[in-house]
Image (cartoon, rainbow, N blue to C red):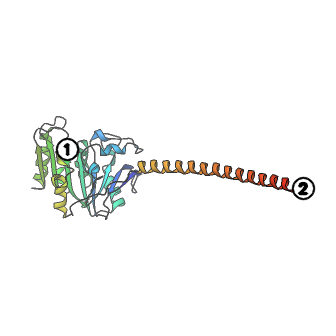
Amino acid sequence: MIINDVKNYTGGTASSFTGREYLAPGGSDTLVIALHPEELKGSADGSQLNVLESIDWWPKFARNQNYPFNIFALQTNTTTLHGILNTIIPAMRKRYNPKNIVLVGLGRGAVDMYNILSENKDADDIKLVIAVSGYSERTGSIPSKWTSVKGLAFHGVNDTRYPISLHQDTVNKYNNSFPGSMALVSFANTGYEAWTKAFNANTSNDQALQFVINELSLAQPTPAPPATNCDEIQQQLTAAQAQITSLQAQISTLTSQRNAAQAEVTRLKTGIQASLNQMPS
């Protein structure tokens, strides 16, 4: 995929967004907005974007796979997204002009994924949601206002940070408003980091990926060609330049020695000729 760092993008909104985008090489009208767990937050200047690829999910796997959708992995420097719930969808529309939007949230990112869904009631382009190790804070009154989208939730049975019962309650109340719209997949012997099972580097075993592909009729991903290591190439160029500089210095030294030798030959010839001229006939 084509990978770019995005820093302080506003998209015509009052908010500023920093993250990393992964673009499908052939283009795509589907956009995945990926919201990280709080452990992956970073500074607003974008200097810690590599942290986004430190766990098993699509931003990490996109280094080796060409997915059939674009990804914008947002990075925040705060625990929650409360300040941008109303602006992130319009900003992403401005940048990518997607036909389909898929919201993906992990941990606290999953909590805010549900909040974004609640705050953007006109977002008909939000087609799917994937929530891992989260729940909705607003299940008391908001679900009836949610846009009717299909969703897939994942949770570890042993999660002590966000107990699975909270997520089950979210799914149940969502389905009360929109029957059959969301399913919850539970993982036994798994705690908070359920994304290690929801996503998979082997695309055929990636439950979240196959859900998106099947629902939106997308093509299967293809292996990406080996990534070019820019640092390694720069090191090679620097070494080559040093060799060129060394050779140029050697050529300069040899040229000086040749010129000195030619001058000595000329001097000797002149002396010999002078001696010949002084000899009696």
- Per the image, the residue denoted by label 2 is 280
Q: Quadrant of the C terminus?
A: bottom right
Q: Type of residue at label 2? A: Pro
Residue 199: image x %, image y %? 20, 49
Query: Camera-side residue: 244 or 44?
Result: 244
Residue 79: image x %, image y %? 30, 39
Residue 95: image x %, image y %? 36, 59
In this rendering, would 132 be left or right of 248? left
Dividing the picture into quadrants, the one containing residue 203 is bottom left
Residue 146: image x %, image y %? 20, 54
Q: Which mark is residue 232?
A: none
Q: Are marks 2 and 1 in contact (CB under 8 Å)?
A: no
Which structural element holds mark 2?
loop
* Residue 112 appears in the picture as rendered: yes
Residue at the location (13% across, 36% down)?
158
- Per the image, the residue denoted by label 1 is 196
Q: Type of residue at label 1? A: Thr
Residue at the location (49% across, 48% down)?
239
Q: Earlier in the sequence, mark 2 or mark 1?
A: 1
Which structural element holds mark 1?
helix
